Image (spheres, coloured by chain):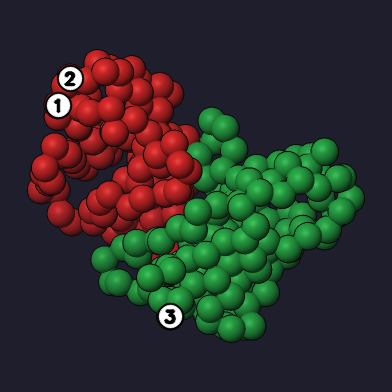
Amino acid sequence: AQKVTQAQTEISVVEKEDVTLDCVYETRDTTYYLFWYKQPPSGELVFLIRRNSFDEQNEISGRYSWNFQKSTSSFNFTITASQVVDSAVYFCALSEAGDSSYKLIFGSGTRLLVRP
Amino acid sequence: NAGVTQTPKFQVLKTGQSMTLQCAQDMNHEYMSWYRQDPGMGLRLIHYSVGAGITDQGEVPNGYNVSRSTTEDFPLRLLSAAPSQTSVYFCASSYSQGLGNIQYFGAGTRLSVL
């Protein structure tokens, strides 16, 4: 069965610290997709990144970077030099190929608090 | 640039009342879905639709009905609300992208059932 685990329920850091949010997934499919979404205090869900199972390249976008490792079934998210505006709940999600490609399986989320 | 629009934003119901949560998208997306968000549980799929006239159940469909008569609209109906349906509801839409379909979410409806 498919499953996404975000073991860190809440993380608190001081501004400018680096922080890594962990995501571990389970799936029997060889083709699948991984996502990160951000939910700021206002409540909406904002798409951050998509990665497919055949692309293990790490990605960097400004202060954000993602480390995808199939060997450990992990897709971790690092924020460098965190800022107060990064305070949010972050969700990792998984979808499989074919008919399931539009159904997201979410982790329980990690609440990040960045203190000034 | 509306995207996915959900109404209402907030709603309080009494147990046994019925209501419809509205969802509309203006991006001509074929896929639409409803999720509920509960503390400590992430988002869970309630129902989804792959096109007008086609709907199917997700992970937690009990107590909810949906229909999709147009591409744009995907309402979620609670026929007899229960306190267990107190949650935040999100509607999402997507289109076939070949490499994992990014879902675009509405702002959510916060529902309390007393």
Q: Kindly identify which residue carries mark 1.
A: A81
Q: Is residue A8 left or right of residue B84?
A: left
Counting labels gives 3
Residue B60, percent from left and from top:
65, 51
Tell me if A50 is positioned left or right of B81 in this view: left
Amino acid type at mark 2? Glu
- Say which quadrant the C terminus of chain A sits in: top left
Residue contact between numbered discs 3 and 2, judged by CB atoms under 8 Å: no
- Identify the chain drawn in red: A
Real-space Cα distance between discs 3 and 2? 42 Å
Would you say the residues marked 1 and 2 are in contact, meaning their CB atoms lie under 8 Å apart?
A: yes
Kindly identify which numbered label has been placed on residue B22.
none
* SS assignment at label 1: loop
Which residue is at 40% across, 22% downward?
A10
**Residues at marks 3 and 2 on the same chain:** no
First-in-chain label (1 vs 2)? 2
For the residues marked 3 and 1, what is the alpha-carbon distance in whole angstroms?
A: 39 Å
Q: Tag 1: residue type?
A: Ala
Q: Which mark is on residue A17?
A: 2
In the rendered image, which quarter is residue B57 located in? bottom right
Q: Are marks 3 and 1 on the same chain?
A: no
